Amino acid sequence: MTSPVLTARCVHKSYRLGKTEIPVLRGVDLEVQSGEIVALLGASGAGKSTLLHVLGLLDPPSEGEILYDGRSVHGLSIRERARLRHDHTGFVFQFYHLIPELTALQNVLLAGMMTDSVLRYWSRRQEAKKAATALLERVGLGDRLKHRPAELSGGERQRVAIARALLAEPRVILADEPTGNLDSNTAEGVIELMFELQRERDAAFVLVTHDEGLAVRANRIIRLRDGVVVG
Amino acid sequence: MYRFYLAIRYLVTRPINLLGMLGITLSVWALVVVVSLFSGFMVVIEEHVRETSADVAVTNLPLWADANKLGRALTDDPNVAATAPRLVHFGLLHEAGKRPPPPPLPGRSALHGGDQPFLFVYGVDPAQERQVSAFDAWLTSEEIPAAMRVADPSRPFATANDRAQVLVGLERMKREGLARGDELVLTTGIRRGGEGRGEFQQVAIELEIAGAFKTRHGGFDGNILFMGIGELGRRLAASDEPGPAEPSPTPGTGNEPAQGQQRVQEIAIRLHDPTAVDDTARRLQEAVFRTLQRRHYGYGLVETWRARNADFLGSIEHQRWLLKIVLFVILVIAAFLMLATLSMMVTEKTGDIGILTSMGGTPGGVTMTFLACGLTVTALGVALGIATGTVTSIYLEEIRQFLIWATGVDLFPLDVYNLDRVPCNIDGWWLLQVTGMAFGTGLLASALPAWRAARHDPLISLRGN
Ligand SMILES: Nc1ncnc2c1ncn2[C@@H]1O[C@H](COP(=O)(O)OP(=O)(O)OP(=O)(O)O)[C@@H](O)[C@H]1O
Ligand SMILES: [Mg+2]
């Protein structure tokens, strides 16, 4: 059997506020297999976002380790970690985090520029544009390519964010309450789309949510309470 | 790639950054135009100063020096084209029986030596003087009106009476309402008596104006009076002599002043190759010391034209320095303007730092993004400033003409400097220095906001607003 795309081993994370240590994660073990949908549930403040950030290499764990495809990311340089973040994971956030100065197409394209030198990007700019356009068409925004985020609805913005997260063809999609800011109808559409894309690409999917109804549609539910996985 | 791409997008969506760019453009423009103009003036002034100074001069010759022997020693040098003896004295010019005019209040013309009654008297030999300077041209300048012209430029000091014939600078002639044939008195003095206990004795020399001379160096014209060297020597000798207030040479060297020999204080020298002036001056100094057989009391110093005018030229160079410093301060202020707009932008864009990091950006990349913003602004500002500055400098004269035509205001009164167009000297090295300075300050001004952006914790914005 192949190694899980994403593994957390005994991950601890605490924040230091002045002299006191605030433990947020206290020994989280987690394995996510390729093509699997994992729902991450837990009360507010349970540490869901923190875990997601640690899994996505945005925040180093205080203790324990993270493995991508069975290989530890421990000891990698800042650049190597950034590279891995780009190649291996795609993030979707509750608040979209699109760059307001860029159009929908440019926002998606930006994800393709992250690791390229100017020359290299220039030589493959046509392909990059084609791929980004195709992705935006796939998420149903073929007629919104030139719109700025301010000219898009919440649902449309989240679709742009999804297209952006998928451009580099990541093995894992890490989504932090992607529908938290949308009304239920729109949310349903966005979730449907994400599941479809996940199936198409056979990517793993870690979905943080408060919505039990949504969670049951996942392959697996993981509950966080007081920094540990329960049930 | 994303760094430059984002930097450009950030900039074009924020016209406020034009402000920083314009600030840099303006200061670079000023650095180029003002310094080019001033350098142009310096070139012209140097030219004018040079015109009135021989290439090299042997100065401060003692009374006992043998001018003929010195002259021969000098002309032995392969680079010496001609020599001319000079006698340099001083005095106050006034009408007979009247006091000299009072000294002027300190001011521009006083600094240029224009208005003061005090004068230097140059005793020259016209035949030899015209070999080392533009003496002939000074007497025949077209600007001299007929009533002030020397009757016979080849013999300017020829006289029919017993008055010493003198040449006065044209501007002074005009200012004091003098004309050829006017009679004046030069009051001066001479140290008399011997063996170190010299006593100062007043001497009055009766003069007649032979005509005006006109160089392009206003300070020279205002301060100098020309007289025949023999005449001046005689007038001073009549009340002086034999005067070894100056140290005698070592006895027995055969260096005693020959009887009846012309007094010479200075020997002006023209060179074949003026570019080799420094080397030649060094050789000539050796030759002078050999001929005088003694090195003492600073007698017989050989000075190049530049060394002779070092104080004057140095003061102008110093002014240029001050100007550069003041203009550089403007550049720094412009950089502050850019720093302010960039800082505003960074504060506004910290939200983007989180998502960039999640997509594979590094703190270094974030720094570069904002640094690229600052450098782009700087580069555009510098390019625009250098370009407009250079064009402005080249067309300064046309711009002046236009301003006169449009407003009647003359920004550069050229006749003060005896110029026919606004001078300008664009120095490639200076342009390079300006570019370097602008980029240096630009880099410093963008580094601060960029560094702040890199230190921003990307998770703060990702956790939501
Ligand atoms: N930088 C920080 N410094 C100190 N404490 C922090 C920091 N970041 C997060 N925390 C704390 O960690 C705990 C977990 O936060 P986290 O955002 O992971 O919760 P969450 O489960 O995502 O909650 P929510 O459902 O509200 O998003 C919270 O109590 C929070 O106060
Ligand atoms: Mg959260």
Image (cartoon, coloured by chain):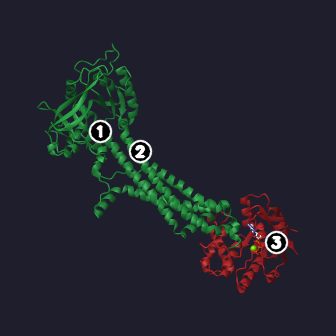
Chain colours: A red, B green
Q: Quadrant of the C terminus of chain B?
A: bottom right
Tell me if mark 3 has few (under 14), some (14-19) or many (20+) residues whose alpha carbon lies within 10 angstroms of its own.
Answer: some
Residue B352 point in image, percent of width and height: 64, 69
**What residue appears at the point 71 percent right and 72 percent down from the top-left corner?**
A165
Looking at the rendered structure, which numbered label has been put on residue B318?
2
Q: List x then y, in percent, for residue B457.
A: 69, 64
Residue at 35%, 24% in the rendered image: B288
Chain to which the residue tagged by mark 1 belongs? B
Question: Real-space Cα distance between discs 1 and 3?
Answer: 92 Å
Q: CA distance from mark 3 to mark 2?
A: 75 Å
| Viewer-side residue, B280 vs B208 | B208
The residue at the far left in this view is B160
Classify mark 2: helix, strand or loop: helix
Looking at the image, residue A166 sits to the left or right of residue B227; the answer is right
Q: Position of residue B302 (x, y in %)?
A: 36, 29
- CA neighbours of label 1 inside 10 A, class few (<14), some (14 to 19), many (20+): some
Residue at label 3? A34
Are the residues flagged by discs 1 and 3 from a single subunit? no
- Image point 68% across, 78% down: which residue? A158
Query: Residue B52: which numbered mark, if any?
Result: 1
